[in-house]
Image (tube, grey):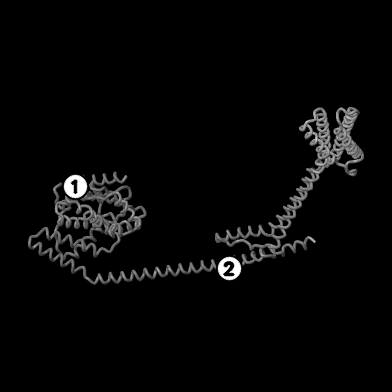
Amino acid sequence: MYQKLRELWLSTTLKHKLSLYTAMVILIMASSAVFNVWVMDFTLDGFDKILSDNSRCNDFQQAMELEIDAFESYVRERTEEHWEEYILSCVRTERCIRALPFQYSSIGEERYARTWNIKNSYEAYSVFREQILKMNEEESGYITSLYRVYDMQDYLKDYARRLVQVTLSKGNETYQRQVPVFYNIPYLILAVSLCLTVMAIVLTRLLSNTLIQPVVKLAHNSRKIARNDFSGEDLAVPNRDEMGELVAAFNKMKHATEGYINTLKKNNEMAGLLHGEELERMEMEKQLESAKLELLKSQINPHFLFNTLNMIGCMAKLEDAATTEKMIYSMSNLFRYNLKTSEQFVALNQELKVVQDYVYIQQMRFGSRIRYDSDIQVNGGQVIIPAFTLQPIVENAVIHGLSKKEQGGRLYLRIWQKENCVIISVADTGVGMTQEQLESLKEGLKERRSAKVGIGLGNIYKRIHILYEKGEMNIWSRRGCGTVVQMVIPLERVDETETVTKKADEEKTGRKEIRKKEPDSENTDTGEADEKTAGQIGRKTEAESRKETS
């Protein structure tokens, strides 16, 4: 039987289940309401009957007493007011007599006899009372008749008192018989409430097992699928209603979604591989185009440019134009270094020679506005640094710092060793930068944006951080004071003899056996201050810029 009912419940549609559940809930609520009404009616009916009988008997006793008082007042003083009061009291008494319970089956033998005596006695009393009131006080027999009325009133009062006593006694007996029932009513209410509560819980649990729990399981698995977690077994519910169909459809959707996502992952992986191959192909095409451009550039023979400059230098020598000759040789050295240096790393001396040639040319251009000083505390032939490192920074100091300052300034190059690193500092007393410009420059260097920092400075910053794990490049600047660029490069050394020999071979190739002693760097300063003063200003600029940044 239970199995059949269970199968019937599982196969019932959700609509019918909800309808049945609603009907059962309404039935439980209605049963509870009917039971409560019955308990209240039973309780109140017993008390109401006792209280009602007591009240009616008491009302008759009081009405009789009031009528007697009104009769005496009217007999003593026959006024209109006393007459009205007497009539009202009589009407009240008659109404109370009619209201007295007079059913033998419900009030019992004794109360019925008392009530019957009262009704008959009052009827005879009323007739005799009216006759007395019609008599004149001076007539014979008036007094005798009056006292007879008083005696009849005393009898009625006595009947009323006995009726009240009997009614109270009967009511008390009835109450005592019902007291045990009243005491058991709370327990009965509790028992019925528990039964109805159990029924409600059973119905709720039954509905929860077939409706709520499957929905909770669906929500839980939906959250797992939202996290791309398709693990776990399929949902299984015994329902054969709409919920069972929904769970079956959800399981199918889960497998379909899992397969679709796996397919998308494989497609994304394949697309990533294809994209990587496409990038490699584009990079190869870019390198090929660059190689074609370099090949086109290399078609212009650099020796033609070098030989032409050397020939102009020879002509300047024949004409005793020493300054012109040195400028041409400096320019030739710059071209040769830029066009023929293919190594990624060079000796420090080569970079210093390029800086000297570049500063000499700029001093010839700006005259005493540019003053140069250097302090090299390392062996330049044994220290290796990335090629094209110093000249672009010195060029930035001249173009963006010193040339924009009307009175010019000093350029100070200082190189020293600290632990296992070579520190290169290029300081100038030019126009400097504001704090906003400096922060924008640093941000552009970190984000590798050439538009903000320029190709030369950005390329040096990038190469230092790529080639050296501990390499650094710092910039300090103050508006109106100057700028300091400092590079920290891990120390690498080569054989000094090998470096010097290589440098000599390069110079020999480019000059066609023209030998001339180059001017010392000390003579490149054409300014007003001496070498010592320039060095002090350069160091002061570097120190002030560091202090401002911190």
- Quadrant (top left/top right/bottom left/bottom right) for the C terminus: top left
> Residue 357 falls in which quadrant of the image?
bottom left
> Residue 178 falls in which quadrant of the image?
top right
Q: Residues within 10 Å of mark 2 (few under 14, many from 20)?
A: few
Residue in front for this viewpoint, 153 or 452: 153
Would you say 71 lies left or right of 350 here?
right
The residue lying at 20 percent from left, 53 percent from top is 404
Numbered label attached to residue 256: 2
Q: x, y (%) of residue 368?
A: 14, 51
The residue lying at 10 percent from left, 62 percent from top is 316
Kind of residue sitting beneath label 1: Ala
> Residue 326 falls in which quadrant of the image?
bottom left
Q: Is residue 493 above or below residue 547?
A: below
The residue identified by callout 1 is: 534
Indicate the secondary structure of the residue bearing disc 1: helix
Q: Is residue 267 visible?
A: yes
Q: x, y (%) of residue 273?
A: 45, 68
Would you say 176 lies left or right of 235 here?
right
Would you say 366 lies left or right of 345 here?
left
